[in-house]
Amino acid sequence: MSSAGVVVVGSGFGGGVAALRLSEKGYRVTVVEAGRRFADTDFARSPWQLHRLVWAPRLRMSGIVEVRARRRLLTLTGVGVGGGSLAYAGAHHRPEPEIFRAPGWDPSVDWPAELAPCYDLAERMLGSTTVPRPDCDAGGDGALRQVAGDLRATTTFHPTRVGVYFGPPGVPADDPYFDGRGPGRTGCTGCGCCATGCRVGAKNTLVKNYLHLAEQLGARIRPLTTVTSLHPQPGGGWRLRTVRSGALVRGRVETLDADQVVLAAGAWGTVELLHRCRAAGTLPALSPALGTGTRTNREVLLAISDPGAGVGPGVAISSALRPDDRTLVQLCRLGPGFHPLGAAFVPPVRRFGPHTALLFAMERANSTLTSRYRCGRMTFAPGEGPAEPVSLAAARAVAGRYAERVGGRTHTLWWGPLLRLPFTAHLLGGCPLGGDSRTSVMDVHHRVHGYPGLHIADASAVPTNLGCNPALTITAMAERAFAQWPTA
Ligand SMILES: Cc1cc2nc3c(=O)[nH]c(=O)nc-3n(C[C@H](O)[C@H](O)[C@H](O)COP(=O)(O)OP(=O)(O)OC[C@H]3O[C@@H](n4cnc5c(N)ncnc54)[C@H](O)[C@@H]3O)c2cc1C
């Protein structure tokens, strides 16, 4: 690789920002991505196309979501060129300002002031806009608004902001965002399939913004390639070992050389890779803080069957309310045809899809897990604060009222109460930021302590439970980090 070559590991939100901003600054960028590349039409039409939904390459499933279960945690993470943006519901939320006063946000940085322009930029890049059509007098959004009234939280009810193109439904349009440099979009049809992969072409995934623009500037993306280890080179620079993702027998190991490496493999991928490198002795000086401060965003998912009109059409997450000052509850929907997913709840939901409202709650409270690496597996031990929740009283109250309003019934994920297994789609932390290498993995410029040329920009850098969807914050933090790089 020529000088100023940067390898970015992972192509999600942090990786997308790295690829574009470093390409703009003249670096030669190669993005290595474990998952495959998808065209809009490759996403699953129904849950029977499990191989297009779930990532388990050894079972020949190369979908967009990886499910991992450990004793204390069940996680969903996105996989593929575009990372979590392929499966995300597209909801964008700026956290409450007091978040940045919580422990973990290093006090040497004025985070609200430094991140404010980065949030603006992230919103522009991801095409963030307020959902124009939650019909707040009808369907699920109407019911949620009534619930807000019941709970004296009317002023907190709001349509969500999402990264979705709301041109005329189903009508293709030239790039509406980047003066014609981006790909075309098609107006959202309100099918509700955002989180199973948008086949319409309305959701602004990273392949439609950051990665698209980065490739135009020469960034190369290598899909289906997993980075297995990192080796600092004696004269400076890095060597990465990679294998073909999901190879049944130990595949051919390839090496990639780089002057600098950006880890953007997500809060699971980055932390696991660093743990493995430390255990194998290739990065022995990594901070003992690696894996501390891992967070679940304290999430709970409830379903409410609605025997009446149902939740109605719309984007996957269309409105929200705050039943108290630390809990956010969002109304979610899945598209038609996803009935088998009703089996994930107790009692099972029979008419899953348009007749089911999903309530997704997140709580802004401090609790952590610590990840460890044993026998080639990442495991989790309790960290600070209360246990991770399998139920939230405020969310149950919203669900109870909602069920009363629609004459339905509340259903919970069966593994929550039965196995006491917390669940998260928003795993955060594990690589604390700070000036002291004993208590943080990287400095506030996202440079790993003790390893020049190694950087981290993804969910593992988010140092608190945000109590809201994190993708916008991950993007804004990455924008801040790469704005500080010099030109090549
Ligand atoms: C179903 C679902 C819905 C969601 N909805 C929302 C939402 O509406 N709003 C929101 O804010 N957030 C949402 N999220 C969460 C959001 O997707 C994540 O927080 C976000 O994607 C994390 O970004 P990241 O930059 O940390 O990395 P990711 O986006 O997770 O990307 C990491 C990438 O690295 C790759 N990778 C991992 N290890 C390796 C390796 N060793 N070698 C090469 N590549 C590797 C992975 O395949 C992946 O593509 C959702 C998540 C899920 C699963």
Image (tube, helix red, strand yellow):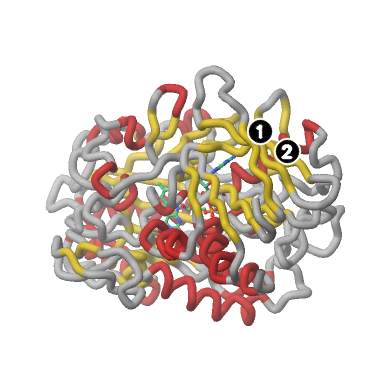
Q: Position of residue 132 (x, y in %)?
A: 24, 72
User: Closer to the camera, 168 or 7?
Assistant: 7
Q: Secondary structure at mark 2?
A: helix
Res. 382 visible in picture: no
Q: Amino acid at mark 1?
A: Met
Q: Quadrant of residue 148?
A: bottom left
- Which residue does the image show at 58% across and 54% down from the upper left? 459
User: Closer to the camera, 77 or 220?
Assistant: 220
Q: Amino acid at mark 2?
A: His
Residue at the limit of the structure toward the front, as seen here: 2
Other-residue count near label 2 (Cα within 10 Å), few / some / many at <14 / 14–19 / ≥20: many
Q: Quadrant of residue 24?
A: bottom right
Q: Quadrant of residue 152?
A: bottom left
Mark 2 or 1: the one toward you:
2
Q: Position of residue 407 (x, y in %)?
A: 20, 49
Residue at which label 2 appears:
275
Quick check: 112 left or right of 161? right
Q: Secondary structure at mark 1?
A: strand
- Which residue does the image show at 34% across and 67% down from the upper left? 182
Residue at which label 1 appears:
378
Q: How many marks?
A: 2
Q: In this picture, is 295 found above or below 42?
A: below
User: Closer to the camera, 103 or 114?
Assistant: 114
Quick check: 424 left or right of 43? right
Res. 454 visible in picture: yes
- Which residue does the image show at 46% across and 37% down from the upper left? 66
Which of the image's four quarters has the C terminus? bottom right
Between marks 2 and 1, how big is the CA–CA gap?
8 Å
